[in-house]
Image (spheres, grey):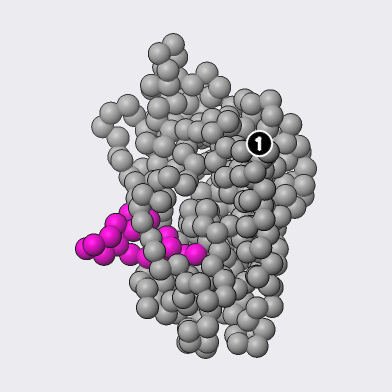
Amino acid sequence: MDKTLLLLLVITVCVSSSSAQLSVGFYGRSCPRVESIVKRVALDKFKQAPTSAAATVRLFFHDCFGCDASVTLASTPANRAEKDADINKSLAGDAFDSVMKAKKAVEAECPGVVSCADVLAILTRDFVGLTGGPAWQVKKGRRDGRISRAEAATANLPGAEFSVNQLLKNFATKGLNLVDLVSLSGAHTFGFAHCDQFSSRLYNFSSSNRMDPTMSSSFASDLKKSCPIRGGNPNLVEPFDPVTPFEFDNAYYKNLLAGRGLVTSDQELYSDRRTRKLVRLFSKKRQRFFNAFADAMDKMGSIGVKTGTSGEIRRDCSRIN
């Protein structure tokens, strides 16, 4: 048997096995109000800081290339944790604060019962809904990991400059397919990116093109004003979707059609013929995108989960018990 096919079969079996141990009603007796508690925190946090929604979804993505809340663990003198990996340094403080507040509220009613990983999964779904996106049932029963290493994040997460080939390969190692890739990328319909995540497209794209030729010239001009080649503010961010930056909609795909994808890995989805058809479909059919996104989030939420007696139920999401 082909080694790649064998690997994908193993991944599929592992993901299916993990998913089978999760259930929507996992806390039906032990913490029946967990979802309403988390939703209340999400609503309060969203009113206070609307950017928390996209930030928390991004945190879930970065955790769920192994969904065990390892990304919320703080570094120690002896260990540099995932959250401090270079690829994770742009994760927003409001996202971590959202998780900590939701966990604290759940602990007040159900101490030592609900994992940080499940709190993050529920919170993510609620934030998507609060910004106009789809709803889905969150399967629960994840346990929290006890190990968090920066090098693991660097090895697992896709980069902003990835090609479609690299993205497909990266997603396949987690049991995710082309539809999952295109639909999950749609989370860039809200949120922000730092200038250093896309500046190479403006000033140093290749030996033959200073600027990425797939980028709209007017879009590039606007970005250059905010992100100059030198002397700019390194903390400055630009919205993935400048039209509706706080709404979960399908504007992301419409932007790609117009050459207004912010990072390389976004615009590549329209440049590559394998993914272009789905980009066009989702740009026209919002509900098709929403359905695919919800399915992919459910699928991604089962990657690398710990269940049963594996891991632990952390009392504090930033440290092991």
Residue 144 in the image: x percent, y percent?
Answer: 48, 70
What type is the residue that disc 1 sits on? Asp
Instruction: Give the residue drawn at x 34%, y 29%.
Output: 228
Asked whether 83 falls inside the magenta stretch, the response is yes
Query: Which image quarter: residue 241?
Result: top right
Q: Sort mark 1 into few (<14), some (14-19) or many (20+) by Cα contacts within 10 Å.
A: few
Instruction: Give the residue drawn at x 68%, y 32%.
Output: 275
Residue lying farthest top? 208
Residue 223 in the image: x percent, y percent?
Answer: 44, 31
Identify residue for label 1: 2
- Front residue of 293/139: it is 139
- Please tell me how many numbered marks the rendered image carries: 1
Residue 200 in the image: x percent, y percent?
Answer: 40, 27
Q: Is residue 119 left or right of residue 233?
A: right
- Callout 1: SS: loop
The answer to whether residue 153 is seen in the rendering is yes
The answer to whether residue 261 is seen in the rendering is no
Instruction: Give the residue drawn at x 28%, y 28%.
Output: 230
Q: Is residue 86 left or right of residue 306?
A: left
- Front residue of 16/166: it is 16
Q: Which residues are magenta?
A: 68-84
Instruction: Give the residue drawn at x 63%, y 64%.
Output: 18
